[in-house]
Image (cartoon, grey):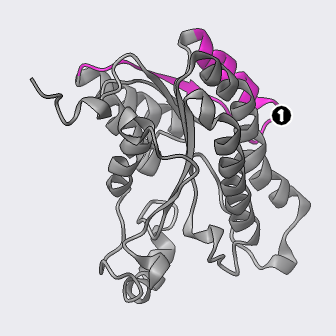
Amino acid sequence: MPQDTFDRFRLTGRTALVTGARREIGRAIALALAGAGARLAIHHAGTTEETADADTVVREIEQAGGTARAFGQDFALDDSGHRLAAAVTAWSPVDILVLNASIELPEAYQAITRERFDKQVSVNLRSPLELLQALVPPMGARGWGRVVTIGSVQQVRPHPQMMVYAGTKAAQLNWSWNLARQFGGRGVTVNNLAPGAILTARNRTQMATEGEALVQRIPAGRLGKPDDLAGAALLLCSDAGAYINGVDLYVDGGRSIA
């Protein structure tokens, strides 16, 4: 019998940690990986609202016959990446790491304060680095692993009001290339998945005023949805994407070429 075309997309027996997975893009990716058979560690920042949202995602996965657990950790706090890695690893060794959690604090570059700069760097870079330090070497030792960083069109088209956020996304892309070269020979792939204009709660107000003009610059003719990221993430996290390494994959409706 020929191999089922979809066998290489299946993640049965794998454990995935998706940061910032309580809603929107993180949730969509987590549900896709769970649907392919992975156990899911659902990370959230630990507030009452985020805890409730994460628990809802866990229930959704369990009701579909999957396995999931929520883990709260505020990435703005010291050593939070190491703490999260330890907690999840005690539950199950991590095979797939999706670095989705981030914050953006829009403001003119002259107005950037040390406090707001440090918070964005802590959440978007320092804590993710700690997760990479803790989780990627064991993947290499086991001979299989997937890392997907969630970037942004801001990497190359920075908004004037998002200087720090855009800079952290550019740095994250550089890290994905760096690690792809270091671990590619050990069965670990590291790729960056860059959303374009995705309609989420975080940018809904902005899109209400800028969305119509932005759509005119998107060849697909519409804003993206969180679910639009799911298929690309599943490819990069599975054996189907085993020979994709060090890629910066845009999911942007063609905006990057317009």
Badge 1 marks a residue whose secondary structure is loop
Q: Relative to residue 31, is residue 249 drawn left or right?
A: right
Camera-side residue: 186 or 67? 186
10 Å crowding of disc 1: few (<14), some (14-19), many (20+): few
Depicted 28 relative to depicted 11: above or below: below
The residue positioned 72% from the left and 47% from the top of the image is 178
Report the span colored magenta: 65-90
Instruction: Check if residue 93 falls in the magenta segment.
Output: no
Q: Quadrant of the C terminus?
A: bottom left
Q: Residue at x 44, y 78 (%)?
A: 255
Q: Which three-letter amino acid code belongs to the residue tagged 1?
A: Asp
Q: Nearer the viewer, residue 174 or 114?
A: 174
Image coords of residue 168 (percent x, y): 73, 59
Residue 143 visible (yes or no): yes
Visible in this render: residue 48?
A: no
* Left or right, residue 193 beside residue 60: right
Hey, which residue is sitting farthest top in the picture?
A: 90
Q: Quadrant of residue 78?
A: top right
Q: Residue furthest right?
A: 114
> Disc 1 marks which residue?
78
Q: Taking 142 as reference, is 62 left or right? A: left
Nearer the observer, 250 or 117: 250
Residue 245 x/y as whole percent: 54, 46
Residue 217 location (% of width, % of height):
42, 87
Residue under the point 70% across and 62% down: 170
Q: Quadrant of residue 36?
A: top left
